[in-house]
Amino acid sequence: MPRAAALERLAYTLAAPALATAPNLDPSGPVTASIAGLGVIGAAGIAVSTNATEGRGRKILRWIPPALAGAIDVVASYTPGTGPAAMDLIMAGVWAAAGWAVMPYAKHSRRHNRPSLANTPRMELEPAPEPPTPAQPDDGASELTRGVRGMWERAGMPGRTIVIRADRHEGRTDDMTLLVRASEPGRPITSLSKAAIAAAFETEEAFVHITSVLATKGRMSGPGWAEVHITPEADRRRSHNPTAKEKWADRIAGRNGGAPGTQLVSVKRDDERGVKFYRGVCTDTTDVPRIDLMKVLRGLGLPEDDSRAFVLIDGAEFLISVFDTPPLSPTFAATRELLTPDPKTGRYVCGFSITGQPVKSFIYQHDKNAAKHGLVLGVTRGGKTQYFAVTMAAESLAGHVVWLSSCFKDEKTTALGEYIDRQGISPIYMARQLRAAKALCQIRAEMPWAYDGKPHDYKPGDDRCPYRQLNVYADEFMTASQDAEFGEFIQADGDALTVMGLKYGIGFNPAGQSPFAHNGFSTEMKDNLRQNSRPVVFNMGSPSATRKAAEGTMENPYDVPTIPTRYAPKEGSAIERAMAGEAEPENGVSTGGVAVVVLDNGRAVLMKALYVDFDQDLGEIFPAETPRLTDHEISELEKLGLWGDWNRPPDPGEFWPEPDDDSDGDGGGGGKRKPRGKNAGKRAEITSTRQALEAIRNLTNA
């Protein structure tokens, strides 16, 4: 300790007793007077020091001890004895302790006080900076980058790489991105692992992500470069509170997810329509989305309700719509306004899609300058006849002639017969209907047009055309084409009509439960129907059967939307009901009238067809006057024996050639003729007991 400091402390210690006792022992004595004088001098010194221009605080501090001693002396002079609670002694002790600790004269008496060399601490020289190394180049890097390089070097330079730059993520403490390259120029990075990086930064391997480097201006790329993302904060938040896009990427877009190789573009809610849209796209825009709707719904944490969730695919993009209530459960009534075709394009509204958009069909192909075919598929009670009423009404409103035949009697087809040109039931009726329509092709090919007296091909919407478009409907075509007696004629004439009918204004509209060759739809027929119609596929009994039937009518194998089984939202847990022994709830209604429509571009859309109430007067949607064939066409058909009652028994030689007189044992020649062709063998085969008894009765004329 410096000598001046020790002496000053000693003076304070010795003066403290005199300061406390002198005013009490001899209030007017010389000691008391001296102390009071020092106080006056100290107060004057403080007053003068306040006006100093330099070192004001230091000067005031030097005058405080005598001024404070004088103040204590005055106070002690007016207190009896040592004062209440020995206040005089306490004040003197505090004064001595304060001066002993501060020492204003020893430490602040000189402005440029310098400690003695003996008391000067030894100066430590800073170590010389280390020379630059490959792991720590002298490139003026930031403090964060230098610190990361040190950790990287301590870990042994993982993957034989060096850190070029480290950037902390905005708003994060631990998340950062490192730009690294191979330590040897020209060498690819081959052994950089997530485990080595995680060990270097003392974090979890799941928080480390390695990506390739994109080439930018002033920065190279390639296999010798890599970006390392260390994101513990972001990954923890992502696992507990992910955004919609993060949830899609983690749960749905993976290899085993419901939509592999895709990314979510946007999520939009339409409160007015009660629907939420998830719009996405394939990361590879040349790919086609492969959507497993049920897995997508599970990934999004939504109920697996196929009556409220639908997917629409357009190229590499897709749209998943999740409705609050089934959008196809309402009934869309058919009206004359909706069914009246546009006079120029021939299009009319046949139903509404899941998004509420009107779905349009056509009564002729305006762009091809030809009539149109039609194909309607679906199981019994699926909505085929309802859809017939919609299309027939639209065609009748445009002035077209409509024929309808079916295999079995039906209340709805009978009701439609009152508003169309011809309608009948039985395979023979269908065979004669198709035969007459095929003959009309030749008749119309020779009908002259009034304006030039020459025959022409059919031109939709041309008022100069001497005949009306004819639309031939064949319900249960699959069953009719397999009929033992008339099936071969029905299929042959149906094939011919699909090939040659369009240029003569005749369209063929078969309906059935399968579009495949073994069920009557030859490849030639199916190709012509597919190219010249808008196929409509109702429920085929199961999602797989519906998808297969729709794919059979599409030019390319696009994804086919699934028709809901029933409008029945799931209630509770099936597992809990099974454990409790409770019955499954019987809820929901049929999805009749819902169909897959194949549009012009080959894309399949789910729609709800317009509803026709057969308990009401159908005259509200049909024209007052039923369109008919011209008199010339009827007379020409009569000449060929193709007009009249199509339900009558077969005429001799109408379908099969007349047998020779000696061909039958009884010599009769007017009996029923045997069928020819591929179905003849079917009649001869006996595969059951009933067929055997029937054959015995025929042999014995029983």
Image (cartoon, rainbow, N blue to C red):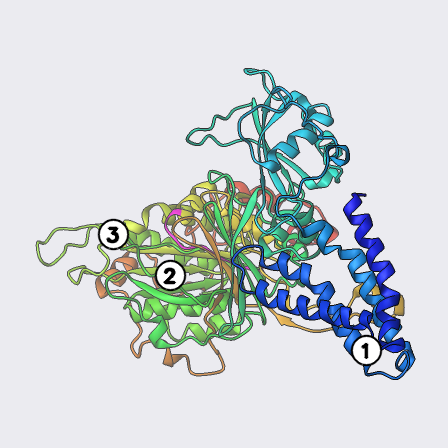
- Position of 195 relative to 297 (above/below): above
Query: Of the numbered discs in the image, which one, if any, rests on residue 529?
Result: none
Label 3: element kind: loop
- Residue lying at 67% horizontally and 51% vertically, measured from the top left: 109
Q: Is residue 522 left or right of residue 506?
A: right
- Is mark 2 in CB contact (under 8 Å) with mark 1? no
**In whole angstroms, how far apart are the C-alphas of marks 1 and 3?**
138 Å
Q: Is residue 499 above or below residue 138?
A: below
Q: Which residue is mark 3?
A: 369
Residue at x 29%, y 62% (from the top left corner)? 346
Can you tell which mark lies on residue 361?
Answer: 2
Could you tell me residue 661's position as x and y percent? Answer: 47, 45
Q: Is residue 463 left or right of residue 337?
A: left
> Which label lies toward us, 3 or 2?
2
Q: Amino acid at mark 1?
A: Ser
Magenta-colored span: 531-539
